[in-house]
Amino acid sequence: MSTKIVHSDNAPAAIGPYSQGVVANGFLFTAGQIALDPATGQVVPGDVKAQTERVMTNLGAVLSTVNAGWKDVVKTTVFLHDMNDFPAFNDVYGRTLGDARPARSTVQVAALPRGVLVEVEAIVAIP
């Protein structure tokens, strides 16, 4: 099996020994995206809605590296710092995905990188 690393300048650069995404066997596996502004490398200010907007924009940029869109997303995993933020997160997530309905797991975690409130990763069938 061969793999290919993908990179978008419109998503935050990796801040450790990992890639924004890896293509393998016709799928794109993304790293978890957090609410970092790719231009500054800083966490965007605001609540979980503001952070989710940035996360979904970052994730969309990684999808675009393989000409994929939300309809191509097979599965997402969502990490929330506080499950009470789920309704606000879900509002932005649902609006961003439109009619796409990938499988999804959502878990509450004790902490996320850089103190963010949300992180999302995806598995994508490459069109």
Image: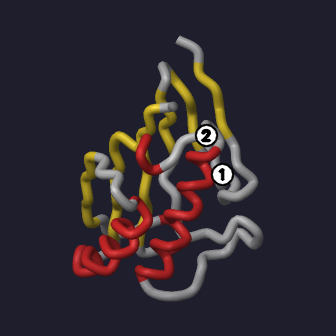
Q: Is residue 66 left or right of residue 126?
A: right
Q: Residue 47: give x, y in percent of width and height.
A: 44, 86
Q: Identify which residue is drawn at 50% across, 31% down.
A: 126
Closer-to-camera residue (100/19): 100
**Disc 2 secondary structure class:** loop
Q: Around disc 2, counting alpha carbons within 10 Å, would you say few (fewer than 14), some (14 to 19), or many (20 or more)? A: few
User: In the rendered structure, which amino acid carries the disc numbered 1?
Assistant: Ala
Looking at the image, is mark 2 or mark 1 nearer the viewer? Answer: 2
Can you tell which mark lies on residue 67?
2
Q: Residue at x 41, y 80 (%)?
A: 48
- Number of residues whose C-alpha sits closer than 10 Å to that of mark 1, classed few (under 14), some (14–19) or many (20 or more): few
Above-or-below relation of 49 to 95: below
User: Which residue bears the numbered disc 1?
Assistant: 14
Q: Quadrant of residue 79?
A: bottom left
Looking at the rendered structure, the number of numbered marks drawn on it comes to 2
Is residue 18 visible to us here? no
| Left or right: 102, with 120 as reference point | left
In the rendered view, would you say 60 is above or below 29?
A: below
| In the image, residue 46 above or below residue 117 | below
Q: Amino acid at mark 2?
A: Asn
Give the image location of residue 23, x and y in percent: 56, 29
What residue is drawn where x is 69% and y is 43%? 7
The way the protein has been coloured in the rendering is secondary structure
Residue that appears at 25% across and 60% down: 107
- Quarter of the image where one finds residue 94: bottom left
Disc 1 element: loop
Tag shown at residue 2: none
x and y, in percent, of residue 12 in the image: 67, 59
